[in-house]
Image: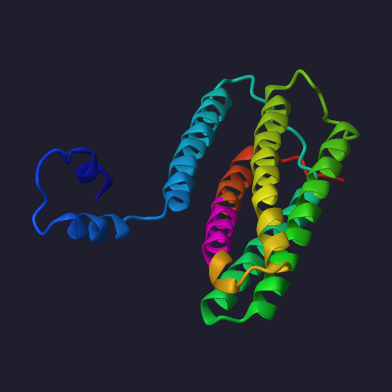
Amino acid sequence: MIFRQLLEKPWEPVPGGIDDRRDAGASLLPAATIGLRMFIAVVSVLFMLLITAYGSRMAVEAWRPGPEPWLLWLNTALLILSSAAMHWAWAAARRGRIDGVKSGLLGGGVFAFAFLAGQILAWQQLGTMAGYDVTNPAIAFFYLITALHALHLAGGIVAWGRTTLRIWGDCELAQIRQSVKLCTIYWHFLLLIWLVLFSLLFSGSDNLGI
């Protein structure tokens, strides 16, 4: 649809007149949805490159997996709960239940903040472990990958905050339904990325956190 629109020649007459062109334009996806899809595509490529580099480095004979902080398991559960709460908000928005939207958004944000706080504690916990070595490529990759993921989640929290403020303001539910949907999609995307990263970061590691 978008590619066909780019190939249109605006100087040529449109069958049916201007109204048909307006109707065709009305069927296009909202700009925010297109923007989110493009952003997700770019972020996916970024993390795919990191995963490829990580996998290539693991093939080196001298690879030493880092210790696994136990707190990451709790953080994973928190991010799952955050994504589930956002999905609850989106389901409530489709049903026109504003109280459910508020509860879902609030829960999604609280669990997201808890996840970020847990990641910071996990970084600190990693530094106290016996197998910690800042020159270890596995640990360097851990900091890089988890920091990038946390940064993208923090960016999502900015959008979540704007949507949450609007729902507690004077905005009608219909005006922010799209924002709730986009936040939910982004939360599910970050959860998927984290599950992939979490399963990869300590592959082949026999060291459990203390």
Looking at the picture, tell me which residue is in the foreground, 144 or 94.
Answer: 94
Query: In which quadrant of the rendered view does residue 145 lie?
Result: top right
Query: Residue 70: in sight, yes or no?
Result: no
Q: Give the residue at x 64% y 51%.
A: 159
Q: How many numbered circles does the render carry?
A: 0
Residue 111: x percent and y percent? 76, 60
Query: In which quadrant of the rendered view does residue 106 lie?
Result: bottom right
Q: Is residue 146 magenta?
A: no
The overriding secondary structure of the stretch rendered in magenta is helix
Q: Does residue 26 appear to the left or right of 92 in the view shown?
A: left
Residue 67: x percent and y percent? 77, 37
Q: Give the residue at x 65% y 78%.
A: 98
Query: In which quadrant of the rendered view does residue 96 lie?
Result: bottom right
Q: Give the residue at x 11% y 50%.
A: 14
Residue 75: x percent and y percent? 75, 53
Residue 158: x percent and y percent? 69, 48
Q: Does residue 76 appear to the left or right of 60 in the view shown?
A: right
Q: Does residue 70 appear to the left or right of 141 in the view shown?
A: right
Q: Give the residue at x 87% y 39%.
A: 125
Residue positioned most to the front: 18
Q: Which residues are magenta?
A: 177-189
Query: Residue 112: in sight, yes or no?
Result: yes
Looking at the picture, tell me which residue is in the foreground, 197 or 27.
Answer: 27
Rendered position, 123 above or below 16 = above
Looking at the picture, tell me which residue is in the foreground, 104 or 4.
Answer: 4
